[in-house]
Amino acid sequence: MSKRGQNEGSIRQRKDGTWEARYTIGVKENGKPNRKSVYAKTRKEVKDKLNAILLSLKNGTYTNSNNVLFIDWLSKWLETYAKPNIKLATYTSYETYIRGHLKPYFLNTKLQAVSAEMLQKFFNYKQNNGRLDNREGGLSAKTLKNIYNMLHASFKQAYINGLVQTNIVESIRTPKIFKKEMRVLTREEQNKLIHVARNYRLGIVVILDLFTGMRLGEILALRWCDVDLKGESLIVRNSIKRLSTHEKTSKNQNKTKLILDTPKSQTSYREIPLLSPIVKELKAHKSKQNLEKQLASNSYINKDFLFCNTIGEPYDQKTFWKEYSLMLVEAGLRDKKEKPIRNKIKKNIKSKPKSHADKVQVTFHTLRHTFATRAIEQGMEIPVLSKILGHADISTTLNKYCHAIPDRKRENMEKIECLYDDSLDGKI
């Protein structure tokens, strides 16, 4: 046995090869020391668990694992361990998963009583009956995967803290996430949409995205301090989104707040060169905005946003979508009475598609896909495109847009033909 200092526990390897760490918490009713044990497969693992427990004892935050409720641990994990290291949007999603999905299902279940089978049944149930809006159907494969990732992280921390003996989430199976069919505008559709967009207040957003490939939240978060019109470039620093505050309005609806958050990932911070015609479009847009400032006078709130209403307040994605939908209808890319495709599937409504546009809806992300596809068609280097799109890895760009990469195997193979000729001349 490898002993530690007094009252600091001890570590030993058991006969079955596993490692045990023992520590003492006060005394029992009979006056004898109240000893506890945690276990792990390696000495390092059990030492880390013991150190975490000893630290919690020192800080006064230790909790008897036998009395911890599953939901209480998830809430504590979210606030103490996850919140400092995740984006606000992720925190909001996790809070909703815990409060809306897990709490009703595991209301009075203790952490140590949760089994892999119980969690698997939870995921199976949510796959078929998981919605919180009282509509039929279950959660999407993506949402279930997000819940899985959250639970995996929380159980990993519980394992480190000595609250559970293993991370049971690792044995859970969630539905496979199928790659969605990508909608890319044809050149004719793209030109038509640009023509229509020029007649709308927010049409400049559409035009800018078709020539930068930015995410909608990133575009709506742009401020003039992020744009260098003279140097013809912009910097992506933020993303804007509307998040729930989990408070209720007088009509018992969830209150929301528009949040200026960091971009999706570290690689999403990036500089994007602007084409001269786009700079010209932005200059014209700025002139119109300056005129609105004058008309609004003291009512205008100057927050420096590129895209804002007549008094300077930024747009959220839902508000933009209302105007964007009108553009799509006028450009012939969306039927005026068209319902979301996902609703048709859930209600088993069968309709004969008239075109590719009927099969896959045009969303705002379609513009990003269209930009990337056109860029590859025009010969832009994949590594450069990957940086412009803000992808974390070049493989993401290749996987998404391999369809647009021209098949030039023959002409590229011919580039090394000279090596064969050189070999005949004895030059190799």
Image: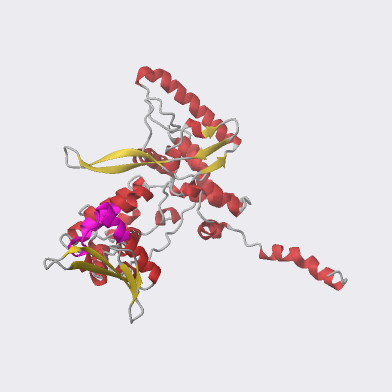
Q: Is residue 302 left or right of residue 229?
A: left
Where residue 95 sits in the image (x, y, percent)? 27, 51
Where residue 192 sits in the image (x, y, percent)? 50, 42
Residue 94 in view in this figure: no
The foreground one among 171 and 286 is 171
The foreground one among 241 and 354 is 241
Q: Which residues are magenta?
A: 52-78
The foreground one among 293 and 277 is 293
Query: For the view shown, which residue lies furthest in the bottom direction?
Result: 15
Q: Is residue 146 left or right of residue 306?
A: left
- Picture quarter containing residue 329? top left
Placement of the N terminus among the 4 image quadrants: bottom left
Query: For the view shown, which residue lies furthest in the front direction?
Result: 6
Q: Is residue 253 left or right of residue 395?
A: left
Residue drawn at x 66%, y 65% as measured from the top left: 409
- The color scheme shown is secondary structure
Residue 131 counted in the magenta span: no
Is the residue 100 above or below the residue 419 in the image? above
- Picture quarter containing residue 254? top left
Residue 55 counted in the magenta span: yes
Query: For the view shown, which residue lies furthest in the right direction?
Result: 425
Residue drawn at x 38%, y 29% as measured from the top left: 309
Where residue 299 sits in the image (x, y, percent)? 34, 20
Is the residue 298 above or below the residue 145 in the image? above
Placement of the C terminus among the 4 image quadrants: bottom right
Is the residue 288 above or below the residue 267 in the image? above
Q: Count how many numbered circles sit on residues in the image.
A: 0
Where residue 34 sits in the image (x, y, percent)? 19, 66
Residue 125 in view in this figure: yes
Q: Main secondary structure of the magenta part?
A: helix
- Picture quarter containing residue 65? bottom left
